[in-house]
Amino acid sequence: MSDKKSISEADLLLIANQIIQDHENYLEGMRATSVEVKDEVLVFKGEYFLSDQGLPTEKTTAVFNMFKYLAHHLSKEFTVK
């Protein structure tokens, strides 16, 4: 049996986006817009700041790292209803 708290996607996104805004690596516009569970890991998605050609930018790496941070920390505590 899991000790994880079951939470709605909307409530989890509120928590995640507050963490993002409070984080030292926050960039203007960085925001999680959806979350799903894959193999008991929370996967966050949002704007990745790709170039006009659809290629990654420096901001893309920052967003990827932030979503990875969220997955690592929040997956221990929460699951989506």
Image (cartoon, helix red, strand yellow):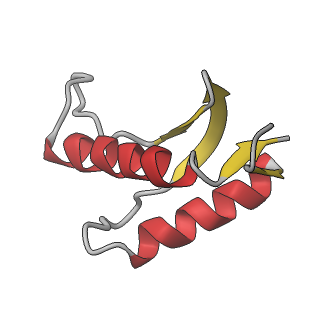
Please report the residue visible at 55 percent of the width from the left and 72 percent of the height from the top: 18
Is residue 32 positioned above or below 39 on the image?
A: below
The percent coordinates of residue 57 (x first, y second) are 16, 38
Location of the C terminus (image quadrant): top right
Please report the residue visible at 77 percent of the width from the left and 60 percent of the height from the top: 11
Q: How many marks?
A: 0
Between 21 and 75, the one lying in front of the other is 75
Please report the residue visible at 28 percent of the width from the left and 46 percent of the height from the top: 65
Is residue 78 positioned above or below 39 on the image?
A: below
Residue furthest to the front: 1
The percent coordinates of residue 51 (x first, y second) are 22, 33
Please report the residue visible at 44 percent of the width from the left and 46 percent of the height from the top: 72
Left or right: where 72 falls relative to 27 = right
Is residue 70 positioned above or below 37 on the image?
A: below
Between 33 and 79, the one lying in front of the other is 79
The percent coordinates of residue 69 (x first, y second) are 37, 51
The picture quadrant where one finds residue 58 is: top left
Between 48 and 42, the one lying in front of the other is 42
Left or right: where 46 falls relative to 3 = left
Location of the N terminus (image quadrant): top right
The picture quadrant where one finds residue 42 is: top right
